[in-house]
Image (tube, helix red, strand yellow):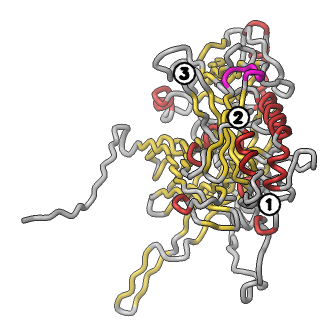
Amino acid sequence: MRFSNFFVSASLGNLALGAAFSTGRLESRKKGHGTDCSLNQTTTSAPHKNFWGSLTTQETKDVLALLHSNATGFNLTAAADAGSRDNKIMSVELMMPNKTDVLPLLSDSTGTPERYALASLMFGAAESAYVQEFKVGPLPITNASYVMPYTFTNTRGDGKIPVVNPDAEDYANFNLEIMKGAEDVTKRLWNLTVEDGLQMPLAFAAPLTVTEDKVIMWQGFNAPVTSIYDTISLLPLGLYMRSDITGRDPSKWKVTGWVYNNTFYKDLDAFRKVIAEPDFKPLGANLDQPWAHTNKHGDALPLDDSPPPASVQSGRERFSVDAEESYVTWMDFAFYVSITRDNGLRLYDIRYKGKRIMYELGLDEAIAHYAGIDPVQSGTCYFDSMNGFGPTMISLVKGYDCPAYSHYVNVTQTTGETTYTQKDGLCMFEIDKGFPIQRHSWAGHTTVTKNIAFNIRAIYTIGNYDYMTTYQFHLDGSIEIDVRASGYISSAFYAENEDYGFKIHDSLSGSLHDHVITFKADFDILGEKNSLQKVAIEPTVEK
């Protein structure tokens, strides 16, 4: 679930495609001279340029300048000043080179493929807003560089992607007026109104219901966040509103229905009559109180006040990094690192014992599909790459997200048109798996080998969810991918809905959902013509 902790004055600000990122180069946090980045870190030299390395800061500036030039005819507004009815740059990043162009160069360290930027532009000034991608280059920008629509991946049309809900500011005003008009209802249900200063965030389902001539949106009221904690996804109040937001004229938008306690009401007056009855009892509310906070609760566990075991680095680091080219070697493995806007951390040209075994390895998509008795949960399916994994990389907490002795790497990114550096965005470290990779005892003799693995890790916080993604390399040549999810659940209001989730608080229910996380693994084992075969043992009944 992708909640943003925004209030009604900015509610639905994330409905339109938000500002995206293009990612820049990795920067070692342990700088030094000679062969050492620090007392413990060794360096290496990449065999060739990182063909998948993100745009440099200068390349990004030059591409932005070209896009803003009058010659393009885009009539762009600076991203920082743009509203929903302006044309603006959403993201600029490296256009990944085609594999067929790169393969001949992997054995020849002298050549490089032509570099291009991929720019995503939002055309909000058009009568019907749309997003379109453009190819910009070759890089560096010269008089020979050009800007053209990127339609290579499309099978038809011009590549324009319609945006049916682009006007965040107007949605916020629309919601505010509705809430003011419903103050008697909200006060009756929860003793909350806009005038109280307790502005109520509105959660929204995604995607919208879009037909040929209608755009319909369901929204659920949520209690205000009054603490420092990101509790928005735990505070549903059980009232849902259906709106027709077709077109870009707010005067034509209207509310077309309400749902409370699993009952549909065609308008607010019909609901008012019900709550005015003397025997009406509100269902309750989920308020921002200590039960929803992530600080420590309850009594301490036995001996929990004593320090727990901790991993240590007893010697120098046993892996090498070329910080300029984002190239890493460990034991028999070597690979290049890249960060992309949509997918975050990706690895390229992975080699084992000098031979390429994978051309590319990385996260492709994370889908969360929900189900429920209410119209918000039942209509929700999130594609998290829409937010972008690259933009949501967070600074890692030493000793918790990664061992304290890890090699931490800064990640330079661009959001809108501003470049910044995410401190400690990646970590690399060796770890003892806690069991031997092999052992055997015979005739009074024992051989045993430590099971050491090399890890490269990033964490993405997308709304209420945190995805810890680790690529782990093993001494036996195997590669393991771990994804661990944490954060806050996306909950539902409890209203006799046990079939869709367990009751977990007075008025709160879990929400039945499933996560599907996909990865791309382009194997090049002993050549490019690899295939995948699944072998299974199936029981049969024989007569």
Horizontal and vertical percent position of residue 1: 64, 49
Residue at position x 78%, y 16% in the image:
76
Q: Which residue is mark 3?
A: 212
**Which quarter of the picture shows residue 207?**
top right
191 left or right of 148 in image: right
Q: Quadrant of the C terminus?
A: bottom left
Q: Is residue 111 visible?
A: no
Q: Compared to 20, does 226 lie above or below?
A: below
**Chain part drawn in magenta:** 246-252
Of 380 and 241, the residue lying toward us = 241
Residue at position x 33%, y 43% in the image:
531
Tell which circle, 2 or 1, labels the residue nearer the N-terminal end.
2
Q: Which residue is mark 2?
A: 15
How far apart, in angstroms, are the residues tagged by discs 2 and 3? Answer: 19 Å
Q: Compared to 371, does 210 lie above or below?
A: above
Q: Which residue is mark 1?
A: 287
* Residue situated furthest right in the rendering: 196
**Kind of element beneath mark 1:** loop
Residue type at tag 2: Leu
Horizontal and vertical percent position of residue 241: 69, 41
Residue type at tag 3: Glu
Tell which circle, 3 or 1, labels the residue nearer the N-terminal end.
3
**Crowding at mark 3 (Cα within 10 Å: few <14, some 14-19, many 20+):** few
**Kind of element beneath mark 3:** loop
